Every structure is written in structure tokens, then in C-alpha cells.
Image (cartoon, grey):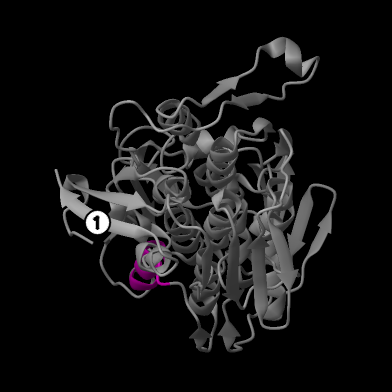
Amino acid sequence: MSSEKQRSIIHVDAAELPEVNGTIILQGSKSISNRVLIIRALSQNSFDIHHLSSSDDTVILNKLLSSKDEILDAHHAGTTFRFLTAFAALTGREAILTGSERMQQRPVGPLVESLRQLGCRIEYLGNEGNPPLKINAHSGLKSRTVKISAEISSQFISALLLTAPVLPEGLEIHLEGSIVSLPYIRMTLKIMEYFGVEHIWEDHVIRIAHQEYKARDFVVEPDWSSASYYYAVAALSQKAGIFLPGLKKDSVQGDAAIAEIAAAFGVRTEFTAEGVHISKTGDDKTGQWFEYNFIEQPDLVQSIAVMAAGLGTTCTYTGLSTLKIKETDRIAALQKELQHFGVHLNLMPARFSKRSSIEYYLQEGKASKPDTPVCISTYNDHRMAMAFAPLALKFPLCIEDPDVVSKSYPEFWQDIRSLGFRLSEAEI
């Protein structure tokens, strides 16, 4: 792909494919890779990590963990920024943490406040509650108990958990409010257990005593979030048979739920010892209505929304609260781009929530080729590009800034081409 991200577009066409078949070897999970990198940096002894993610986020984190520079630039990588904030503050590393323009709009206040409760010295260098941050050395932690909101980002909690065992007295974390993206917290704790760290989780309190991480070689699972795009390909195809080696049913990744979700869209999943076979036959009949709470799998929303749009399935979604603080406001981005194809995603009136504060979104319409050519904007969001690409099975598409996929899945265009998608890049 071109090195000038903002000036390039890619044309994607697979509308005449009668059948989609192939094998896709997915890279390692970005979420798992980043957690294991932090653990290795905190361990007294090094160990090998196999099948490490090739994503920008993981490459950047790996680089910054070994950097001696005062200024650490996480670019667009939210997980990298948040994990490094706790890592630097709690281990006494002095640094200035910064990121892209969008990163400087994303919240970090709850994590900073919790670290200050513990005695860390952190200053905001821009707007209160947002990056960049200046992290100063501290003379010692003044507490082993911390309170943190669980309603904004599970990454705040995982950042604290990962560093907790190496603190002199460990850490007791009190989670306040409803927990979002719970599978990611479970993932963090499960990976920590692999490296010998025990925890106690009672109600909304997680306790981790002072312990040492035990160095053990680690193999990173293939990425289930990336697998979601191939489930969308299968759903929107006339007929499909795609093999994804290495994926497991008992994965620590919450996005493995795509296998169950996609069944509602006519996609079958067969788990084998070697990986996952996903298929669709021409006689599949999908439902006209789909409802799902994405509070535990927010990264699947875009894939499902485009899948449903291509099939004309009416959907109601809840659990979208964290989407507004991702790489872009993903709700607004979906609303705007789906409208190009005659599909509407709207927040339902408050009366539909009865006495609760739950927000319901309604998606209606079947995607059709626009009368005038449009190019899908990606808003510096890798998942916008990858989620919309499978829609090219219905009609040709144009997608802006194709290189944005490198944030999580650099090989995406190469892999989707191997399934028969026709790609051509141009400069604008």
C-alpha cells in the first residue's frame, strides 16, 4: 500500500464471485500480545513470545518498552498508551507520554486519578483528563488500595492489574459502576495466571498480592477480532468455505463470540483440532431481526453492522457506550457511512429504555449501490476499513486510507485478495 495514507484510496470488488474459498493464517492477537509484552518487561527473567502480533500497536509498545527516550509517543495506540501510563507511573519511570491528535482527545482521567490515589505524580500537559502526560518519579506508594470507574474502559483496569504483582504490597482494586468489556479483564487475569500470578476476585474487588512473574515461553493465539471480517465475508457471499488455522473455541478472547453471533446470519462454524472452518451454503436462510448487547464485544459492532446491512437484517443494539471513545466515534462514523447505502442506524427514543438508562440503537435498511460514487471514510480507524470491505461482495466499493489497517492487521488487504477480491489502489 501507499506510504501516503491520507492521499490514497482502494477500490474493492468481489460482486461477481460465485463462491469464496481459502485459508487465512491470522496473525497473533494484538490484545494478548500487548499484555504479554508488559509482563515480560516486569519479569526478572526474559522469555520468548511466539506468534507476536505484527500490528502497529504491538510494534510501538515493544519499541517503547525498551526505549530510553524521555518522550514516548504511542501514536494512535490506546492500549499502548494506557498500559504504559500505569507501567511508568508505578515502576517509577520518568517520561512524557503522548500520542496522535485523536489520542489526545481520548480519556485517560480515571486511570490517572487512580494512580494518583496510590501516590504517583502525574501532570496533564494539555487538557485535563487527556494525554499528553508527564510522569514524575515518586518517593514511594502511599496506599495499596485504589478505586477506579469500570464504566469507561477495561484497559484502565488491565493496566493496573498487570503491574500490581510487582508492587511492594500488591494491589486491591475496587471497581465502581457497571463493568464494560469484561472479557478483556478476564483475559488479563488468565494470562497473568499463566505466568504464576494468583488473584482473588470477590464482587467488585480484585486483590493481587505481591508476587513474581515466572518466566515461561508463550505462544499468542490468532486474533479473533480479525476473524470477524471473514465471518462477514462468509455471511455476504453466495457460498463460502474459509479455514482459519489455530483459532480455539475455549479462547481467552471475548471476540470469539463472533462464531455464535454469525450463526444468526447463516454462517456455520466447525471447530477442529487444527482451527476453525466457517461456511455458508446457498440454502441458508437468515432471520429478518437481530438483537445483541455488545457490552462485552464492542470491537465486533462494525463487522456485524455491515454484515446486517448487506443482508438487510433489521437490528437493535445495546452496549455501545464505549464506541464513542475509540479511534473515532464509531457510532457517528457508522451512521454516516451506512447512510451512503440507504441503511440507517439511529438512537431510539428514551421511552424504549423504560426506567433504565440503557441506550438502544435501531439499524434498518438493506445496502444498495449508491446512485453516485462514494468513498467510505475511515476516520483513522482500522476497523472501519476492514468491516466495510466485505460489502464489496454485493457491489464495488471505494475505501479511503487503506493503510489504516496496519494498526491491528497489516496483512488484511493481501489476505482478502487471496480469497478472490479484486483490489486496485489510486492516489487522490
Residue at numbered disc 1: 424
The quarter holding residue 294 reads top right
In the drawing, does residue 346 fall left or right of residue 369? Answer: right
First to last magenta residue range = 54-63
Viewer-closest of 13 and 61: 13
Residue at the location (68% across, 32% down)? Answer: 318
Looking at the image, which residue sits at the far right?
202
Q: Is the C terminus in the top left, top right, bottom left or bottom right quadrant? A: top left
Q: Would you say residue 98 is visible in this rendering?
A: no
Viewer-closest of 208 and 346: 346
Residue 231 drawn at (x, y percent): 59, 57
**Up-down relation of residue 159 to residue 112 (above or below):** below
Q: Main secondary structure of the magenta part?
A: helix
In the drawing, does residue 326 fall left or right of residue 142? Answer: left
Judge whether residue 58 is colored magenta.
Answer: yes
**Up-down relation of residue 361 to residue 119 (above or below):** above
The quarter holding residue 199 reads bottom right
Judge whether residue 18 is colored magenta.
Answer: no
Residue 301 drawn at (x, y percent): 58, 42
